[in-house]
Image (cartoon, rainbow, N blue to C red):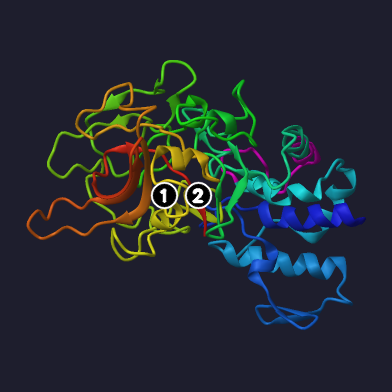
Amino acid sequence: MNVKQKTLAALLVLGIGMSGCNTNDNNLIPQIEDKKAVDGNKTVDGNKTVDEDNETDENRTATILGYIDSQHSDHNSTITVAQLKAITPALNGINDDYQDIYRSYIASTDINISSPATVDEVQSMINEVNDLNLPEHAILDRSFFKKTNGIFEHRFVYLPVKNNTTGRTWLNNNLGADYANVDSSAYDPSQQAKTSTDSLAYGSLFEWGRKADGHELMNRATTGTKKYGMTSTKADEPSDSLFIKVISDDSDWRVNPDDTLWASESSANNVCPAGYRLPLNPNGADDAEHEFAIEVHSWDSENADGAISSDLKLSANGYDHYDTADSVPDDAGSFGNYWSGSVVPSDGNNSTVSYVHDLFFYFSSAVLSDTSHRADSMGVRCIKD
């Protein structure tokens, strides 16, 4: 096999044959290197040690296969080295820069790849990914290859942006921004908000801790409305894309509150791309380690002007309050509202309410709030883990 064929052979073993595995739908298949410990020029994998200088293609593939086999609930993978060697010479156009994207495609339960895969299936995947013509360093939405409402609605592409003052790396746009949407006429993944009132950069409005199930999608470029309707029925695992409007003291869209849904990169409902998460406030609203505080303090001015002139180009995206929500978000163009992943413990006097930390800003100030409700809806800007 040539170099490109070896590359695909490796990624095919990583992705194909994953049906029946106990995997988190929100997580991409990890890099091979992440599962190995390197000792000099030897790679240790489980109980095997292989000299990399003398390792054959077949041995390397078999080692990777052993890792995948360990992930199966029945510890019995159906893919074989012989099958990989049979399929890779017939494939064309493999782009080494897209290895992680090929893996995420193959790993998606919403993409039809057999086990073992056919040449036509894998070639179709290569062509589809290549046709996206992605920019260098492109980061795909965590749900890029997942369907909601029977269609692909999260085809968003982001780029990393570094705040040179803080040294921290973020996504360059809000989740769901039209500039990031492959299917939007405004698609330009390198473009950030031009002004505070740039509706093409506003993006989605999430209920705190909820998956990207479509409830958050907005028709920003037209009427500025929610893409789908609303319901008053709570659910821990909503079966539709309706925004859950809550009229109750606990102000949570869930029946059973869960503080961990957005607490880390590995959280069950993390909506950020792999390797990214929501900013956190580990020690309290006024703590110097609050990741939003660190960001805001680096701005020229701690208000909407500072937000839009910063490296992140944060726009005034608006929000919806849990009990007054309607089809059009409140204060878009006037207030910027962004979730953190951190909750505020209940105070004991009102034990049914546990608030969430967030950032909101307007023309004169930027505020680190600790009184937002989980059924409110706000924007998400992700930070690198």
Quarter of the image with the N terminus in it: bottom right
Please provide percent x and percent y for residue 201.
Answer: 51, 31
In the rendered image, residue 383 lying in the magenta stretch gets the answer: no
| Residue, disc 1 | 269
Q: Quadrant of residue 68?
A: bottom right
Considering depth in this image, is 183 or 303 the residue closer to the camera?
303
Dot 2, crowdedness within 10 Å: few (<14), some or many (≥20)? many
Q: Is residue 48 above or below residue 233?
A: below
Residue at the image point whose x is 81% and y is 56% from the top? 7
Name the mark on residue 239: none
Most frequent secondary structure within the magenta stretch: loop
Q: Are marks 1 and 2 in contact (CB under 8 Å)?
A: yes
Please provide percent x and percent y for residue 156.
Answer: 58, 35
Considering depth in this image, is 87 or 257 the residue closer to the camera?
257
Can residue 348 be seen at all in this image of the molecule?
A: yes
Q: Check disc 1 and report its element: helix, strand or loop.
A: loop
Question: Real-space Cα distance between discs 1 and 2?
Answer: 7 Å
Dot 1, crowdedness within 10 Å: few (<14), some or many (≥20)? many
Task: Give the side of residue 136 with respect to residue 374, left or right.
Answer: right
In the rendered image, residue 113 lying in the magenta stretch gets the answer: yes
Q: Residue furthest top?
A: 223
Hey, what amino acid is under mark 1? Asn
| Residue, disc 2 | 26
Q: Quadrant of residue 93?
A: top right
Considering depth in this image, is 129 or 344 the residue closer to the camera?
344
Residue at the image point whose x is 47% and y is 16% from the top? 222
Disc 1 or 2, which lies upstream in sequence?
Answer: 2
Magenta range is 108-124
